Image: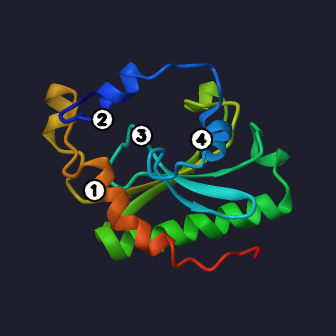
Amino acid sequence: MKQLWAPWRMEYIAENKSDDCIFCELPKINDDFKHNILYRGKYCFVIMNLFPYNSGHLMVSPYSHKNCITKMTEEERRELDYLVGQCVTISRSVHSPEGFNIGINLGKAGGAGFDEHIHCHIVPRWLGDTNFMPVLSETKVHPEHLKATYNKLLPHFLEIAPLYP
């Protein structure tokens, strides 16, 4: 699917790519604005999807490199679940979606782009957001720049009470 806007793509194209796991490496860099990390918990963090299905597409991931929910600790699962709920609450407040797609893709066959590191997608949805553009022209229209969305969401994530202080 083509992107109608992509001003940030040049940065992605120009950067040095590696086989490193983004869910392991990006939190270590400690540049949350650059890497769209909105929240850091004790076991999990919230990051915006760089290639969103819709504006406000978020992901919650544990810091530990695990490829299945069955390998997560109870604390990781509880914090992931807690943060997914916080993402929904904040998204409702900021973007007023009419629904959500929330899910985890396990393995390549299950649709996981990063199949070696578990993460949960939270995708806000609106009636009519799957209009004729994707169907007829294989183009997805994003009404807001990624950093504008980040700046709208960040103040709300700064107010989250940690599940594990």
Q: Earlier in the sequence, mark 2 or mark 4?
A: 2
Q: CA distance from mark 2 to mark 4?
A: 17 Å
Q: CA distance from mark 4 to mark 3?
A: 12 Å
Contact (CB < 8 A) between labels 3 and 2?
yes
Residue 130 spot, x, y in % from top left: 24, 45
Horizontal side of 147 relative to 26 (left or right) equals left
- Secondary element type, mark 3: loop
100 or 21, which lies in front? 21
Q: CA distance from mark 3 to mark 1?
A: 13 Å
Q: CA distance from mark 1 to mark 2?
A: 12 Å
The residue pinned by badge 4 equals 26
Quadrant in which the C terminus appears: bottom right
Dot 3 crowding, Cα within 10 Å, few <14, some 14–19, many 20+: some
Front label number (4 vs 3)? 4
Horizontal side of 127 relative to 63 (left or right) equals left
The residue pinned by badge 3 equals 50
Q: Earlier in the sequence, mark 4 or mark 1?
A: 4
Horizontal side of 37 relative to 3 (left or right) equals right
Residue type at the position of mark 3: Leu
The residue pinned by badge 2 equals 8
Quadrant in which the N terminus appears: top left
Residue 5 spot, x, y in % from top left: 19, 36
Residue type at the position of mark 1: Ala
- Secondary element type, mark 4: helix
**At 75% across and 66% down in the image, what residue appears?**
78
